[in-house]
Image: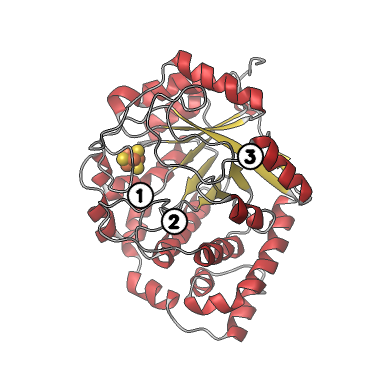
Amino acid sequence: MSFFDFFSSLDQKEIVDRVYAKYDQTYLLTLINKESLHYYDFLALLSPSAESVLNEMAIKSQFITKKFFGNTMLLYVPLYLSNECSNACLYCGFNKNANIIRRTLSLKEIEQEILFLKEKGFDHILLLTGEYPSVAGIDYLEEAISLTKKYFSSISLEVFPSTEAKYKQLVDAGATGLTLYQETYHLPTYKLVHLSGPKTNFAFRLNAPEEALAAGFRKVGLGALLGLTDWRFDSAFVGSHAKYLMNKFWKSDVSISFPRLRHTPSSLPLIFTVSDKNLVQMILAFRLFLPSSALTLSTRESAELRDNLMGLCITQMSAESKTNPGGYTSNLSTEQFSTDDNRSLKKIISCLNKKGLDPILKDWSNHFQGFNQEPA
Ligand code: SF4
């Protein structure tokens, strides 16, 4: 049974009813104090009623985060390789109908960016593309990964959905992680915002994280693009997706990210506001439900919010992000979105240190994958 089959078998009405049921405080406090949470407990913590116990959720989250991750914060940097795309996602600046400056980096240009980022001290890198297989497909990525692994210990990807066989090519080349946001688990909304291109295939995308783990990726990242639909609905299904994968691929890591729409494109038919308070409740509920999962907050969010969530529940953060291909060493293409926290890596490290947290730049070596990393 694939995740799409499992997802199709879920009673969505029952799940929504549980998320919107009224829970009294005493009951919610009992859930927060449980050793491990059932899926239905997680749904209760996503509920509007649970807004009254956010402090208690935060205290328990901090305890759990310290228990499973110590004082660590993993820092990574994204590197956009291409902004070509054959999809028409209404919320994205790279969509095929956007009149922007398109660019796909050559190997020489990738190396230039890599050297710049390595010099800053990064050792975990996230390589990103749009979905345009004839220009930046599997073979292109394979070459990019082979080059990157000479300099970086850990390479993750945020690319297009694919099959186990094709993902295996990327694992064999040296990639360790794949992040793939479903964007939304609400099918009518999904259809409304994905007008054309391969991304219109909801089921193929939904099954791709499973294909990636079957191919040998060590970790996958899930998430919904917050703002497309009711965040409580999407969180409920991100949670079920994560649990499904963790049960099936128990040796692998499943992490969750919380990308929130930064701007409201006029083309979007509807926007569901996700306030800071909503975002915090969501992240805390995930921490209590998935105690050992890495939780990621990117530079889309403000420095203030990121600082407040350090040590509480978030365990991975990006830094110094540019969202246009070649953006670190030149400025010859259009960005996907603008970031909010634009502090340098040094400043983020200093902030972590002040809070008694340990910035982690390296927690993996590709020697473990059988590669000999050449000294950079
Ligand atoms: S979200 Fe991804 S697939 Fe959609 S238009 Fe943007 S880059 Fe392409």
Cα distance, mark 2 to mark 3? 25 Å
Q: For the point 40% across and 72% down, which residue is it?
A: 15
Q: Is residue 255 above or below residue 48?
A: above
Circle 3 SS class: strand
User: Which sits in the foreground, 203 or 149?
Assistant: 149
Q: For the point 67% across and 53% down, which residue is it?
A: 310
Q: Are marks 1 and 2 in contact (CB under 8 Å)?
A: yes
- Residue under circle 3? 75
Q: Which badge, 2 or 3, is on the more N-terminal residue?
A: 3
Q: Is mark 1 within 8 Å of ligand 1?
A: no
User: Which sits in the foreground, 162 or 132?
Assistant: 132
Residue 324 visible in image: yes
Q: Position of residue 14 (x, y in %)?
A: 37, 75
Q: Which mark is residue 241?
A: 2
Q: Residues within 10 Å of mark 2 (few under 14, many from 20)?
A: many
- Residue under circle 1? 206
Circle 2 SS class: helix
Residue 149 visible in image: no
